[in-house]
Each structure stands twice: as C-alpha cells, then as structure tokens.
Amino acid sequence: MAAAISCEGVTKRFGDFTAVDGLDLTVPEGSVFGYLGPNGAGKSTTIRMLMGLSRPTSGRVRVLGQDPLADAAVRRRIGYLPGELRLDDRLTVLQTLESWARLRGTVDLALRDELIERFALDPKKAVRGLSTGNRRKVGLVGAFMSRPDLLVLDEPTNGLDPLMQQVFLDLVAEVAREGRTVLLSSHILSEVERVAGSVAVLRAGRIVASGETARLRRGAAQKFHAVFTDEVPPLTELEGLPGAAEVTAEGQRVTVAWTGSPDALLRTLSRYRLDSLTAPEPDLEDAFFHHYRTDGDRTDTGGRVEAGADAAGI
C-alpha cells in the first residue's frame, strides 16, 4: 500500500533543543492515524515539517510521494488545520473561506455550504466576533471543503462543544469510507480511539509505542477492582506478584493495575472473601499513560512506527 506520509530519520533541532529525534513514520493511504502526545512532545513540530512550513535538521519527509518543501502543488492536496489558527478579523466567515479557496485554486462549493450548515456557522458573521470554538469550526470547514487527499488536523476539536465534536467525528468517518487519509493529532484520547485504526505515542520527540489502536489498548495494564467482605489482602502480598504494576487501597476496595495473564492475581484474591471483582477493558487513555510512564528503554522502538504494524514493546 502506498504511503500518504513517510518520514525517515527525521530530526528537528532548535539550537540545543531537539524537538523531534530520529522519527520514522509511515501512514498508508486511506487510513485514519492518531498522533498522540502531550504539549511539547513534538507533534506540532512534526506537522509543520509535513506541511513544508519547517525544514528538518536531518532526515527525509515525503507527503503524497512528494517533498512538501520543494513541491508547492502537493500542499494543495492537503487539508490542514493548525493547532494555532490565525484568522483575519476584518473578514466575515464566508470571505475567509473564499480567500482560502482562491489560494487553493479549487473548492467544492456545495460541500463548503453543507459544512457551514453542519457546523452551525453564520457565513455573514464577522470573524472578530467569533468564539474560540466557532473559529475552530471555520478552520475545519476550510480543511475539508476541497475534498483533499490528505487531512492533517492538529487538535481539531479544541473549543468545540460535544455536539460539534460528534459532527467532526462523523465527518472523519465519512472521509475514511471514501478512502482518503487523515492524520489526527490530539490529546483527547477518546475521540482518537473512536476513529483511528492505528496510533503512535510520542514522548520527547521519539515514538515510545505504536500500532493498531486495539492492539495498543490490549497492551495496557488492566485494572482489577476487588471489594472484600472482611479481611483485605496485605498490599505487599499483591505488590510482590509478577504482573502487578500498581496497587492501591481504599477501605475494603483494592485496585491492582495488572499486565499479562491474571492467573496469579486471581489465585491470590480467591484466598480472601470477595464481595465483587470487576476488570473493565483498558481504553486508549489507559494505554497512553501506561506507555508514557514506562521507561523508554523498554518501550522505545528506535523511532519507527508504521500504521498497522504490531506495537513494539507491547
């Protein structure tokens, strides 16, 4: 399968500070890929290099098969929403979208008008009077309205209310069904989990975990919540079990974060009178924090991540 995005050994330094460190990233065409990490991890720096807005210190970047720095035409095939969107306050919503369309050279007017309606925007309203969420909606309409081959979206739902977040997720799902590609950079893990087939977790400019979303989620520590009728097991007994990542207690309730087969844990718990035992399936947030807290020597993949590949260290 052809790659919509390919980074090979990409490093970006600002003086003595390394923002992205030896990144290898492959996102196949037609996929929805989640790019995860807190502020300062290097997500936006990566995106700026993908958009040809910043030159890598070293390494090779290709987007839709082209060098985004050398080929301005390829940038017209990308729908881009930056993390910090700047709008001209002198214009209305419609004038803003029309100015972007002139820069791109093409736009689907029917789709533009449909998106304005779906995001509940007033096209005649002046930009200067828009809230943060409504400014974000203008940016989303601009990113989607030309039916781009690739969408690069940096914190797309920042400031959106839950209803508009759902409109956005529906739109991403529609794009995916059409076989177009989406790179979704976000710290809202629940929304990434709903639409992204694969994800990468970035820490200090390097990939610390990657792979299919479901596989990454399964690799996280699972939390067992045990409520005891009377005697509670000594925490040291549970902490000494291989597989126990974290043990906490509150009254008769004990929580154990566990990795691997739970046989040893269940045998230990069965020696005490249990009132209840629950073990919800880990979600992407659990996986993110599990891998983000883990020592880099154990989870680091050498910077390489490929959508659909088995998650390294999982």
Image (cartoon, rainbow, N blue to C red):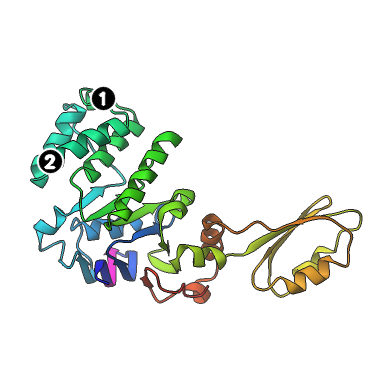
Residue underneath mark 1? 122
Magenta-highlighted residues: 8-14
Q: What's the residue at 29%, 27% (across, down)?
A: 130
**Rendered view: 131 above or below 28:** above
Of callouts 2 and 1, which one flags the residue occurring earlier in the amino acid sequence? 2
Among the 4 quarters of the image, the one containing residue 23 = bottom left
Q: Secondary structure at mark 2?
A: helix
Q: Is residue 159 visible?
A: no
Q: What's the residue at 75%, 68% (across, down)?
A: 239
In this rendered view, identify the residue nearer to me: 151 or 255: 151
The kind of residue tagged 1 is Asp
- Measured as percent of width and height from the top left, residue 242 is found at 71, 75
Would residue 72 be counted in the magenta stretch?
no
The secondary structure that dominates the magenta segment is strand
- Measured as percent of width and height from the top left, residue 137 is found at 30, 36
* Relative to 261, 286 lies left or right: left
Q: Secondary structure at mark 1?
A: loop
- Measured as percent of width and height from the top left, residue 56 is found at 22, 66
Mark 2–mark 1 contact, CB under 8 Å?
no
Q: What's the residue at 45%, 49% (across, down)?
A: 191
- Measured as percent of width and height from the top left, residue 212 is found at 44, 66
Per the rendering, the mark at residue 291 is: none
* Relative to 89, 137 lies left or right: right
Q: What's the residue at 38%, 71% (across, down)?
A: 305
Residue underneath mark 2? 101
The kind of residue tagged 2 is Ala
